Image: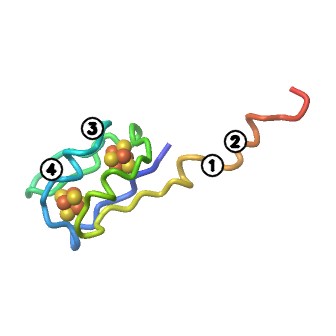
């Protein structure tokens, strides 16, 4: 499961709001006073980091968290 994709270093202001609001501790303070995606597999795609980011630096990709093939495969007719 992959949801939070990347933090654009060109856009990031280093405010760490994203690190503070993430309920799953996916984001951590990295070197150079910039956040890093540390535990990507724990991301719940809640968009709190995106909503709090003042510069639009965070990309979250929900479709990668719910692959269509896997969903249909889980619900087979008649099973
Ligand atoms: S989408 Fe939610 S869980 Fe994922 S990194 Fe952002 S705040 Fe954390
Ligand atoms: S909230 Fe946005 S600008 Fe602030 S540290 Fe996180 S990614 Fe950078």
Residue occupying the point 53% across, 47% down: 65
Identify the residue position indicated by label 1 in the image: 67
Identify the residue position indicated by label 2 in the image: 71
Q: Quadrant of residue 20?
A: top left
Mark 3 vs 1, N-terminal side: 3
For numbered disc 3, what is the local secondary structure?
loop
Identify the residue position indicated by label 4 in the image: 30
Mark 2 vs 3, N-terminal side: 3
For numbered disc 1, what is the local secondary structure?
loop
Q: Label 1: how many residues lie within 10 Å, few (<14), some (14-19) or many (20+)?
A: few
- In three-dimensional space, the C-alpha distance between marks 3 and 1, rounded to whole angstroms, equals 24 Å
For ligand 2, give the image quadrant: bottom left
For numbered disc 4, what is the local secondary structure?
loop
Q: Give the quarter of the figure containing the C terminus.
A: top right
Mark 4 vs 1, N-terminal side: 4
Percent coordinates x, y for residue 48 in the rendering: 33, 50
Identify the residue position indicated by label 3 in the image: 25
The residue mark sitting in front, 2 or 4, is 2
Proximity of marks 2 and 1: CB atoms separated by less than 8 Å? yes
Q: Is mark 3 within 8 Å of ligand 1?
A: yes
For numbered disc 2, what is the local secondary structure?
helix
- In three-dimensional space, the C-alpha distance between marks 2 and 4, rounded to whole angstroms, equals 35 Å
Q: Label 2: how many residues lie within 10 Å, few (<14), some (14-19) or many (20+)?
A: few
Mark 4 vs 3, N-terminal side: 3
Mark 2 vs 4, N-terminal side: 4
Q: Label 4: how many residues lie within 10 Å, few (<14), some (14-19) or many (20+)?
A: few
Q: Is mark 1 within 8 Å of ligand 1?
A: no
Residue in the foreground of this view, choosing between 7 and 54: 54
């Amino acid at each position: 499961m992959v949801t939070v994709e990347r933090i654009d270093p060109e856009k990031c202001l280093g405010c760490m709001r994203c690190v503070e609001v993430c309920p799953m501790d996916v984001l951590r303070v990295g070197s150079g006073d910039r956040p890093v995606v540390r535990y990507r597999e724990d991301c719940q795609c809640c968009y709190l980091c995106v909503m709090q980011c003042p510069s639009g630096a965070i990309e979250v990709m929900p479709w990668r968290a719910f692959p269509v093939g896997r969903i249909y495969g889980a619900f087979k007719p008649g099973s």
